[in-house]
Amino acid sequence: MSIEELDRLLGGVPRGAIVLVAGNPGTGKSSFAARFIYEGPGGANPDST
């Protein structure tokens, strides 16, 4: 599942929202967080904000 797919499923995350990612060990929380940080607010495209 990509971040784009997750955005479609959740409808995005409102600006300023606090999001808790919880789960058992080994479920991908750290990988998700790293991908989220890498993609940034405009995705991998640095021209979008």
Image (cartoon, rainbow, N blue to C red):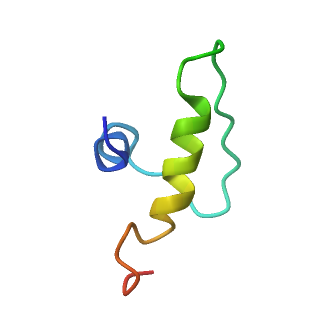
Query: At 37% from the left edge and 87% from the top edge, which residue is drawn?
Result: 47
Looking at the rendering, which quadrant does residue 16 occupy? bottom right
x and y, in percent, of residue 30 in the image: 61, 36
Query: At 53% from the left edge and 27% from the top edge, which residue is drawn?
Result: 28
x and y, in percent, of residue 17 in the image: 66, 53
Which residue is the extreme one toward the top?
24
Which residue is the extreme one toward the bottom?
47
x and y, in percent, of residue 26 in the image: 58, 17
Instruction: Name the quarter where the N terminus is drawn.
Output: top left
Q: Relative to 41, is 24 above or below? A: above
Most foreground residue, 33 or 12: 33
Q: How many marks?
A: 0
Q: Relative to 19, is 28 above or below? A: above
- Is residue 13 visible to us here? no
Left or right placement of residue 12 versus residue 9 in this view = right
Most foreground residue, 10 or 43: 43
- Is residue 39 visible to us here? yes
Instruction: Name the quarter where the C terminus is drawn.
Output: bottom left
Most foreground residue, 41 or 24: 24
Most foreground residue, 5 or 31: 31
Left or right placement of residue 16 versus residue 27 in this view = right
Looking at the rendering, which quadrant does residue 19 occupy? top right
Q: Relative to 46, is 13 above or below? A: above
x and y, in percent, of residue 35 in the image: 49, 50
Query: At 56% from the left edge and 48% from the top edge, which residue is drawn?
Result: 34
Q: Relative to 3, is 1 above or below? A: above
